[in-house]
Amino acid sequence: MISIKRFAYEPGEHELEKASNSYVMSLVAIIGGLPFPIINLIATLAFYVGNRKGTYYVRWHCMQALLSQFSVFLVNTVGFWWTISVILGYESVSNQYIAYLLTILVFNAAEFLGTIFTAIKARKGVHVEWWFYGDLTNLICKP
Amino acid sequence: MRKLIIQGTGMVAVFLFTWFALSEVDWMSIFKVEQITKATEEKLGKTIWDWFNHSEKEIRDSEIFNTVDSLLTKVCASNDIYRDQVELHIVSNEEVNAFALPGNHLVIYSGLINSSENESELCGVIAHELAHIKMEHVMKKLVKEVGLSVVISMSTGNNGGEIVKEAAKLLSSTAYDRKLEKEADLMAVDYLINAGIEPRHFADFLSRLSESQPEIESHFAWISTHPDSQKRADYINSYREGQPQEVVAVLANGTWMRLKENINNLDDNF
């Protein structure tokens, strides 16, 4: 799911910190915005926009962090509104609902651990590409 | 690009497979969701009924109770509903009203019995309220109107009298939304047909009370809070049409008239 690859060039010390921070940003946002999934996405998007004129290495990692956040945002949003419907009495608690919550819990946990790992590696200058998101980032983010 | 599409599809497939695999587990039993929900409803129902019991006078006359109970039992028995699960309360109040409370409490006002011209009309209202109970409309309405936190707070005993009073008023004097009312009406027709009771009488009851004089409409809570009564009567009649039915009498000859006399005598005493 996660692979270590050689980046197009050797990033400098100042780039490593910013690239690592893009993941740290999404981690902080996950903790802060757990009940409201949009907060995670907005925080990561804000960080990306702030660094869109940064170096290729920084932009690349900001983009990977943003894309991974987007899919988590989608599944979490469904879970959020489903929960609201249950709270308001439009839907009942069911095996499917509990299974969905557990599934997004597993995916969020995987994303969370992957993010910590990548943040540490990015800080050390190790270029980590995620399965699917890495290729997607390569497609979108050009030097 | 092809690799990307395969990876994306694979990721979605893994997500859906995990969800569907986990859905096969009976989480409802593991987390005892139904038992907890039932216990909460029962506690809530008791709290709200206790409030009514203090402010209203419940009729304990055995002849009145047994007659109405016979009608309720007939509707329940013909529709696989355990009669013991439903708690029937007949309240002395001239308002034409009947409503369901959480925990399967069914409350019928003497005014509604008085306004019914025959047993089938009363059975129609009973079937309608039973449908609300069976389709869990009561809790849905309560949660929607007062909020889940307030409902939980009431069921855990941390309830202010004002909140219980508001919940009681809400359940006794406001209608469910149109969709839920229609669902309950149509299910009531099914219940009546299964019980061998002519649903047209239920429609007649709605039509008649909707034509009531405006000055006495305030007494017809069950009608004035249920909008478009004539429209309801119409769709009940059209839903009923074409459905085969064998009509049977629930009460013995003269029992219905005796019930109304007993209710009238009670009203005279208050």
Image (spheres, helix red, strand yellow):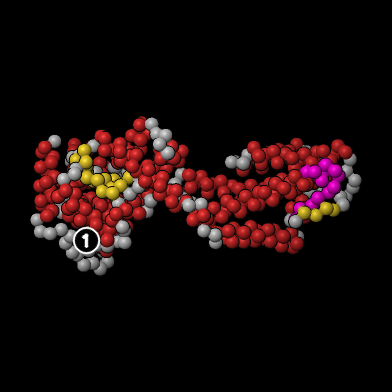
Which quarter of the rendered picture does the C terminus of chain B lie within? top left
Circle 1 SS class: loop
Q: How many marks?
A: 1
Q: Within the image, what quadrant is residue B220 found in?
A: top left
Relative to A13, is A75 on the left or the right?
Answer: left
Q: Position of residue B190 (x, y in %)?
A: 29, 61
Tag 1 subunit: B
Name the residue: 17% across, 53% down: B67
Task: Give, as a three-letter code, the residue at label 1.
Answer: Ile
Q: Within the image, what quadrant is residue B77 found in?
A: bottom left
Relative to A34, is A3 on the left or the right?
Answer: right
Which quarter of the rendered picture does the N terminus of chain B lie within? bottom right
Q: Is residue A104 magenta?
A: no
Q: Is residue B240 visible?
A: no
Nearest to the observer: residue A32 or residue B96: A32
Nearest to the observer: residue B256 or residue B26: B26
Name the residue: 77% across, 54% down: A2
Name the residue: 79% across, 48% down: A141
Q: Is residue A130 magenta?
A: yes
What residue span does the magenta drawing correspond to?
A: A119-131
Name the residue: 24% across, 45% down: B89
Mark 1 Cα-neighbour bin, 10 Å: few <14, some 14–19, many ≥20: many
Relative to B269, is B214 on the left or the right?
Answer: right
Residue under label 1: B197
Q: Position of residue A129 (x, y in %)?
A: 79, 52
Q: Position of residue B22 (x, y in %)?
A: 58, 58
Q: Is residue A1 visible?
A: yes
Nearest to the observer: residue B14 or residue B252: B252
Q: Position of residue B61 (x, y in %)?
A: 16, 45
